[in-house]
Amino acid sequence: MIRSELIQKIADENPHLYQRDVEKIVNTIFEEITDAMSRGDRVELRGFGAFSVKKRDQRIGRNPRTGEAVEVEEKHVPFFKTGKLLRDRLNGN
């Protein structure tokens, strides 16, 4: 499901809301999650999961084309851990 499909589904299930308002709500939620993660905060949505940022240390990697050793800089990457309810639902429990 892509963002526009999510917005359309929410708008269809809530006919009392304008689609532009639903779009604004969805965009605000995503922006808040992104802003919190960029500050290094953890975002937890009970039953769904938790978004956090993990730090990857600097390391020596290999260029897959040439096999040459390449220095890979330290970086921060997003990480998502599923919640128990979501994990159980995916596994049919």
Image (cartoon, rainbow, N blue to C red):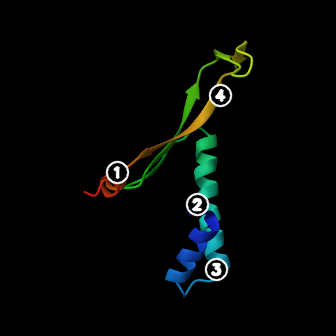
Q: In the structure shown, which secondary structural element does the residue marked by tag 3 occupy?
A: helix
In percent of the image, x 54 and y 75: which residue is there?
9
Tell me the CA gap for discs 4 and 1. 28 Å
Report the disc number at residue 19: 3
Tell me the CA gap for discs 3 and 2. 15 Å
Neighbor class of circle 3 (other Cα within 10 Å; few <14, some 14-19, many 20+) is some
Q: Quadrant of residue 22?
A: bottom right
Neighbor class of circle 1 (other Cα within 10 Å; few <14, some 14-19, many 20+) is some
In percent of the image, x 38 and y 54: which residue is there?
46
Tell me residue 17's x, y (percent).
58, 83
Identify residue type, mark 3: Gln
Report the disc number at residue 78: none
Q: In the structure shown, which secondary structural element does the residue marked by tag 2 occupy?
A: helix
Nearer-N-terminus badge (1/3)? 3
Nearer-N-terminus badge (4/3)? 3
Tell me residue 5's x, y (percent).
59, 70
Q: Which residue is mark 2?
A: 29
Tell me residue 6's x, y (percent).
57, 69
In percent of the image, x 56 and y 63: which residue is there?
1
